Amino acid sequence: MRELARRRLLGALALGASACLLAGPAAMAQSSEQQILVDRARIVVEEFQSDGNFRQLPVYVQNAYAVMVIPNLLKAGFFIGAEYGKGVLLARDLRSGAWSDPAFFDVYGGSLGLQIGGKSSDVILTIMNQGAVDKLLSSQFKLGTDASVAAGPAGVGVGAGTTIQLGEDVYVFERGQGLYGGLTIEGTVFKPHIAWNQSYYGQPVAPQQILGGNVSNAGSAPLREALGRF
């Protein structure tokens, strides 16, 4: 009886291991750090879409060459300011309007001055021309140095009739909690996260290849669909 029970237990364990192997990369991707960030980015997009303070954001997204979504960008400091987060960059097909799969980026920066407080923000950046996209895809990109930047219009008083300004390379739209004084959006640095891009797509891949459609991951479909609703 004991031998029979032992064999049944071993058989059940083997069956469970086989099921995990058969589930393969698709099941693993659902619980990966990269997929969690992609899912959070989709939630951020949907929250911006339902927020009346960002009524003009669709116009910027519809005219953008690419969009970066940064969930939970952390800013904190006491005299020396700092920020850190991770974001995903997606490019828009100018003919069809369809969005590419996401490329992963580290976001960080720092500044000196009288700065006290802390803040956590969800951020959407609209990149308005191909030149700015090309610079962002380089090894390291800094707002205000490699591209001009401005805060996107926001507020309950900003409606569809307000004049749309699209003269800057990058516009920043931010939804945040907390108070932080003195930190400027200029000087923020964006750097491709090579390891995360490779992990998510299962092979070494550059951001240019991701945005060009050379690789894909089905897990990004909800995010791409959400952006398509702008």
Image: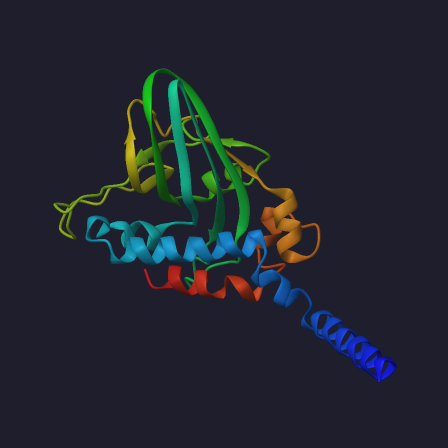
Q: Is the residue 18 above or below the residue 104 in the image?
A: below
Q: Position of residue 114 (x, y in %)?
A: 32, 15
In percent of width and height, residue 126 lies at: 38, 45
Q: Nearer the viewer, residue 88 or 206?
A: 88
Locate residue 119: give its quadrant. Answer: top left
Q: Is residue 166 visible?
A: yes
Q: What residue do we see at 52% from left, 54% from top?
A: 102
List x then y, in percent, for residue 122.
36, 44
Location of the C terminus by quadrant is bottom left
- The answer to which of 214 and 7 lies nearer the viewer is 7
Q: Is residue 198 left or right of residue 84?
A: right
Q: Relative to 92, say whether 116 is above or below.
A: above
Query: 31 or 217: nearer the eye?
Result: 31
Q: Within the image, what quadrant is residue 118 found in?
A: top left
**What colour scheme was applied to this rendering of the protein?**
rainbow
Q: Quadrant of the N terminus?
A: bottom right
* Vertical position of residue 180 compared to residue 78: above or below: below
The residue positioned 71% from the left and 54% from the top of the image is 203
Q: How many marks overall?
A: 0
Q: Is residue 216 visible?
A: no
Residue at the image position 46 percent from the left and 44 percent from the top: 130
Q: Going 70% across and 50% down the picture, which residue do you hit?
A: 204
Q: Position of residue 137 (x, y in %)?
A: 55, 41
